[in-house]
Each structure stands twice: as C-alpha cells, then as structure tokens.
Image (tube, grey):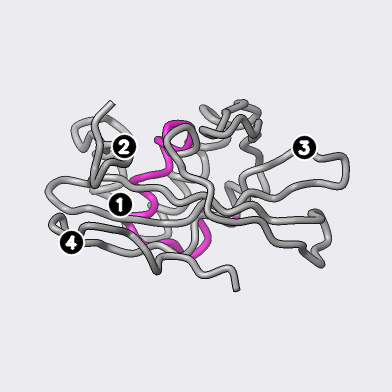
Amino acid sequence: METYSNRKYVEIDLSTEIQKQLEDANPDEQRDIAFRYILNHLRHKKCFTHDGRLVKINRRGAQKITHLAPLEKLRATPYLAELIETSQSIGLDDAEHRYFKQFAYYEIIFKLGDRWYAGVLNIGVHKDDTSSLYDLNPFTRIEESRATLSGVHDSG
C-alpha cells in the first residue's frame, strides 16, 4: 500500500471504463453514472475501516454522495470500498438524525491524476450499532508537499 505523509491513500485509475464514461458526460449524467455504479457494484458491500468498524454501502449513501457532487468526487465513487479501508478515524459525534444516533468521521486521501485530495467519510451509526456510509464531505484538494492534513475536519 502506498502512503502520503505516512498515511495510506487510494490512487484513482483514470483509464477505466467508468472514468471514461464520467469524462464524456455532462454534470447530470455524471451524477447518474456514479449513482448507478454504486448501486450496481458497491451496494450491500461490507467494508471494514482500519479500526474494525463494519460499514455498509447503501442507496441512501449513494444518493447523498452523488447529489450535486463535483467531478473529482464522482471519480472517487468507484473506490469507496478502498477509501473506507484506508481511512483514519478522526471523531465520533452524537447525532439528532432521522436514521442515525451518531456520526463517525474518517479522513481519506486519494490521488487523481497528479492532484491530491482529502476528504471526510461520514459514517452513520444506527441505533442497533450497525454503520452505513452516508457522505464524503468536506472534500478538498491538497498540495503534494503538505506535511499534514490537519484542518480537513473539525468535529468541535
């Protein structure tokens, strides 16, 4: 596994068929392509974070992640399982949410072409303590030379 500032990261392969489809589509089509990809290839997939949290990918998360998302974020969607597996826990907050009692936050890093991005996976924790991927937000470009990723998420 490759690292960035001593952290695991995911490299997005831009030569895959899904990436070519995203490149050739308008923004609405891009969101639809990414959403369908998640439903057809990742939905019901069970992934483990580095600290052992079992995370399921479902329709609710697919809708949230692809809604009004920029192309760079949509390009990362085929790699959601890998992003979950390489993520680092950065916090847990109680939530007053219709579906979740808490949100667990996990920082991720990925490389898209020659650019680096960091983001926070929002993992919803249900009342029965199962977890589902809810969103990838915030999401920012980072500089390759940057030594740390502090400040991407502040749960306080």
Kind of residue at badge 3? Thr
Contact between marks 3 and 2 (CB within 8 A): the answer is no
**Disc 4 residue type?**
Glu
Q: CA distance from mark 2 to mark 4?
A: 16 Å
Residue 95 is situated, as x and y percent measured from the top left of the image, at 77, 64
Q: Which amino acid type is shown beneath numbered disc 2?
A: Val
Residue under the image location 80 percent in, 63 percent down: 97
Instruction: Count residues near mark 4 (Cα–Cα under 10 Å), then give few for <14, some for 14-19, many for 20+.
Output: few
Which segment did they paint magenta? Answer: 64-82
**Residue with the mark numbered 1:** 25
Alpha carbon separation for disc pair 3 and 2: 25 Å
Reading the image, the residue beneath label 3 is 130
Return the disc, 1 or 4, that comes first in the chain's sequence. 1
Separation of residues labelled 3 and 4 (CA atoms): 35 Å
The residue to which callout 2 is attached is 10
Cα separation between marks 1 and 4: 28 Å
Q: Position of residue 6 (x, y in %)?
A: 27, 41
Q: Nearer the viewer, mark 1 or mark 3?
A: 3
Q: Earlier in the sequence, mark 2 or mark 4?
A: 2
Q: Secondary structure at mark 2?
A: strand
Lower sequence index among marks 2 and 1: 2
